[in-house]
Amino acid sequence: MSFPPIARVRQSIPQPRVADVAGTVRQSIIESRIRDRVKPGGRIAVGCGSRGITAIPVVARAAVDALNELGFRPFIVAAMGSHGGATAEGQRALLAGYGITPETMGVEVRTEMETVVVGKSPVGLPIYFDKNAYEADGIVLLNRVKPHTDFHAAHESGVLKMLVIGLGKREGAAQVHKLGLRGMKEVLPAVGKVLVENTKLALGVAIIENAEDVPAEIVAIEPDTIFDVEPKLLNRARELMGRLPFDQIDVLIVGELGKNYSGAGMDPNVIGRLMIETQPDFDRPRVTRLAVLDVSEESHGNIVGIGFADLTTERLVSRMDLDAFRINVLTACMLERARIPITLPADRDVFAAALDTCWRIEPAEARMVLIPNTLEVNTLWVSPALEDDVRAHPLLAFEGSYEKIPFAPDGTLDQERLFPESVRGRRAAGAYVVHSKR
């Protein structure tokens, strides 16, 4: 097959950003009312999750330092539900992959999976809560507020969800997900209300990222204002998030999926595919053929979200950690996203199959887009069929001429050359360290 050439395109959206992340985190904590809630010298559990928040090591260290400055005794606690294979070792590895270790934070990192029961949910199920956090004198949660990959409601991904599902560990996450969308939309906020009233939540630190995946705002949320403040932050995050700039795409090639890019592996808000039983997909973008080539190292073999794709590589599937993948999928209760698509030996074969089945007579006619992942969408590579769309878009600009798709002799796409500024590109250049699971 003769592949169409591709050209690099920059999507430039004016974005606010926090100039001094550490200083802003410190100020938000120092100026909060946390001292009214936690006694001097009290132990504070600082919750950190499994999402790929760009600035999380800086945010976490700044929070620890600020709490020390106030005379508290902070420690890190894993707040990521069933991720990391629902094991203490797996969750410790995920935190380490984001640079959160006892050495970098200067405090203990607790990832035990033990929980206590803190009442019952509105549907009569027990409410599970992390034992380490429950026994602390105070809890501070650090999380990004952004649109969720599964549903739209007043509270989606954010501090409240981390309180309910993140600190619920495997059992707590399962109890909410068991009811599907009803669990996320109705049970989650109701359980959140119980936990706000019956645990020692002392403060939330909400991070809103811009389309370049760096902090645009950092806001301290007092427990008694969370139900009013977080929905407003969510609306702001929705305005800022990066999206694909085309309504219709024949072939979308995603370099990597991974939990560090989206809780769903690939963000439905970006690819337009929701893949939830009984629910319709989004109106845009409409993607005829979607392919994903690899899984990120940071995902440690959890290939959740593979079911979004029509085509993938044998390499990606061979890197699956079956236990981590199975536990995450069964806990989330969204099985459509776990179906393994057609697998092919090499990236070149995936491109060929995608172009051959995208309902165009000739490959040259295909509206093809390449992105590194669904989190970093400021740099795209497009085929000539999209040239008029690019030139007509006020926020898009070509950054070079068309060139051949860079396949290695073994048929592997040179993602590092196409996307040197991406997580994968920085990882290959030694500028992004991934800690192993062991």
Image (spheres, grey):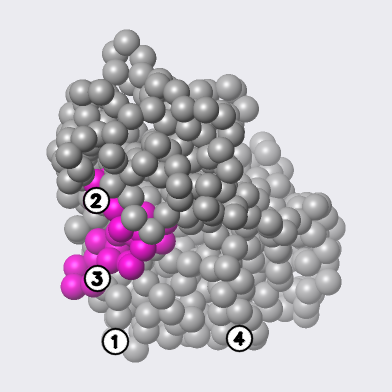
Q: Nearer the viewer, residue 276 or 260?
A: 276
Q: Provide the secondary structure element on which disc 4 rests.
A: helix
**Sequence-first tag of 3 and 4:** 4
**Sequence-first tag of 4 and 1:** 1
Verify whether residue 282 appears in magenta.
Answer: yes
SS majority, magenta: loop
Measuring 24% from the left and 51% from the top, which residue is drawn there? 288
Residue 35 visible: yes
**Residue pointed to by mark 1:** 123
Q: Nearer the viewer, mark 4 or mark 1?
A: 4
The answer to whether the residues at label 3 and label 1 have Cβ atoms under 8 Å apart is no
Per the rendering, the mark at residue 228 is 4
Provide residue 321's location: percent of width, then percent of height: 28, 37
Measuring 60% from the left and 39% from the top, which residue is drawn there? 99
Per the rendering, the mark at residue 280 is 3
**Sequence-first tag of 2 and 4:** 4
Residue type (three-letter) at the residue carrying disc 1: Val
How far apart marks 3 and 4 lie (CA) works out to: 29 Å
Provide residue 258's location: percent of width, then percent of height: 40, 44
The answer to whether the residues at label 3 and label 4 have Cβ atoms under 8 Å apart is no
Q: Provide the secondary structure element on which disc 2 rests.
A: strand
Give the residues in magenta. Answer: 269-290
Provide residue 340's location: percent of width, then percent of height: 18, 44
Verify whether residue 331 appears in magenta.
Answer: no
The quadrant of the rendering that contains the N terminus is top left
How far apart marks 2 and 4 lie (CA) works out to: 40 Å
Q: Nearer the viewer, residue 190 or 128?
A: 190
